[in-house]
Image (tube, helix red, strand yellow):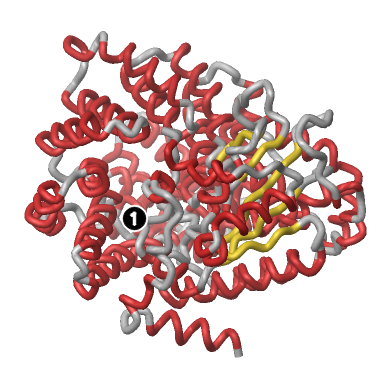
Amino acid sequence: MIIVNTIRKAEQAHQQGQLAEAESLYRQALSNEQHIDAIYGLATLKMQLKEYAVATQLFEQALSIEPQALDINFNYLLCLKQSNQVDQSKERLREISHHVGNNSQMVSAFANLAFELGDYQQVINITSVSQQNQDNINFIAARAHMALNQWPDAIQYLVKLSERHPNNTELLNLLAQCYGHTLNFNLAMPIFEQLTALAPSLENTLRFADLCILAQDKAKAEQLVAQLENHANTEFSAQASLQLLSIKTKLARLNHDKPQAISLAEQLLAREPSSSLAWQVLFELGNDSAHKQVLKQLPVVVETSEQHSFDYRQNLYTLAKVYEKSDEYQRAFEYFTRANQSQYLQLANQNRAFSYQTLKAEINRLTEIDYAHLAETEQSKMPATNSPTDHPTNIFVVGMPRSGTTLVNRLLCQATNVASVNESNGIASVYEHLLAQIAAADIPAYLAKNAKALAEKYHDALPALPAQTEIIVDKMPHNFRFVGAILASFSNAKIVQMRRNPEDLALSIFSQQFNDYHNYACDQKAIAQTIFEANKLMDVWAKRYPEQVYDLSYEDLVNNPESEAKAIFDSLSLRWQPSYLEFYQQAVPSFTFSEVQVRKPINQSKIGFAKHYHDQLSEFRAAYNSLLK
């Protein structure tokens, strides 16, 4: 009883900030008995005094008595973190996390500590076990999913939170970011409009204008730029002014206004020498003099830039393409390789490197789902234009990136009453989580029951299209994963699957910077494995659904454009006109890597282009050929 009273007095002194007296009382209690409350109290006091070595020993002594005590474990982890023993703290957190249980206070405390430690998977593990549907717990879970680039999971949490707190600007901001990362720009747009209304600021308006470009709403972006320019002279910081200049450069580029784009790019470089956007514009739109400027100045910029940044890598790609244009292929490939190695290392450090095992498992699962009987519907014949439908008929152009999807998209959009949503992420938003979470055996029945709702969910998220639109083209390449699900849900849908020579395709992928979602794109072996698996899956769709799936070779289209294009149109019940091959004369913005190519007539310049890099692509060939055996 005396010891208990002494500990109680020590704790009271501790709470009142009388640390010397508290320490004396804790030690007095410990001189009689190694009481856990005294050990723990003294440990927290020593941590408060930043005597971390002593505190650590005391916490470990307390844990030897009660190893699963959550309060002791939490403060021990905190002590390790504060003494910069982060790895030890993470290791202990993994050991104790499954004991956190369902106490909301403990769940919140441990989850927040795990987030501060950068152990985002542990945040998810801790919060997913909890049955507490509390805002603070859901919020930290959403942020952890965002940190791991698990955008759909984050969206689920944030949507629920924003329903309860519809005007919370932090939630709106995070939700808009998630929609942006999943390319659901049309869902991000109204959220950002609401955000700028609730929290009007130059920063938010600039971000909104940039988002409008990504969402392909050029008119809205131009309206916001005009609005911003009214304030540019008086209210803009140097950084904001630079952002506005960057947005104006993007718009000039999209508008095919070469002189304006080049002028703005030069202004950008005068203020921000590492601007990858500006160097790209000079290379793509500039004359020989501009190319010489790039060759002279960009190598210096690259060597002095922050490595592993987006601009650093993009400038390496631009420099490589300048050398490629000069037929210096060996030097070009050295820069391509440096850019890809930078992204490869960054992904590896973030534990987000490509896994062939994961890809194979996904492809195998998609092929094992029995969609066949669901596709036996009225889908086999597409209605001609001008025929009434509940929804516009859908054409999905799919395939690997860089396989010619943009070219086919532009051709199809020449037809009457056909409009494109370009690269919409709507299909992935509808099916990616669904197909991963529902048991494979249950998916056919689920799709049959919910087909109309799934199709409507997709259509509801699309951007505004011309009123006369009767056929919608969606050219998101990686939708080849969802062909079975699409045909099970969309009446009268048609698929165009693009194929391309594997080596040319691999080179085209390796010579572009892709976002981290395409984690295969920075490694030759991973590119080989991904192309192989993609072709394997597309072979399945072509065999299962010959009436709905049109397989098209990029090489055939480019070598015989009129006959091949007419065949595509015939298969889709669209009227063909030879004048459609002159699509490149239209000043239509293209928002993809292929924007330069689609501004030119169809030509054969990229067929067999990989021959210039025969030796450098040996790793790809070896990997791909081994898979073919």
Across the whole image, how many numbered discs are drawn on residues? 1
Q: Is residue 185 left or right of residue 317?
A: right
The quadrant where residue 23 appears? top left
Instruction: Return the residue found at the far bottom.
Output: 629
Q: Which residue is rendered at x = 70% and y = 55% of the image?
A: 482
Q: What's the residue at 50%, 66% (across, down)?
A: 64
Q: Is residue 434 left or right of residue 623?
A: right
Which residue is nearer to you in this view: 123 or 443? 443
Front residue of 329/132: it is 329
What x and y, as percent, mark residue 401? Answer: 51, 58
Q: Position of residue 498 (x, y in %)?
A: 60, 60
Occupied quadrant, residue 534:
bottom right
Q: Look at 54% across and 88% down and name the residue there.
A: 626
Would you call the spot at circle 1 few (<14 residues within 10 Å), some (14-19), or many (20 or more)? many
User: Which of the pair 618/169 is nearer the observer?
Assistant: 618
Q: Secondary structure at mark 1?
A: helix
* Residue 66 in view: no
Q: Position of residue 363 (x, y in %)?
A: 68, 68
Look at mark 1 in the image and give the residue it sits on.
55
Q: Is residue 385 visible?
A: yes
> Which quadrant of the figure contains the C terminus?
bottom right
- Residue at 87%, 55% (x, y): give it: 375
Which amino acid lies under the numbered mark 1 shown in the image of this protein? Answer: Ala
Q: Is residue 607 above or below residue 418?
A: below
User: From the viewer's perspective, is residue 373 above or below residue 597?
Assistant: below
Residue 560's spot in the image, x, y percent?
55, 62
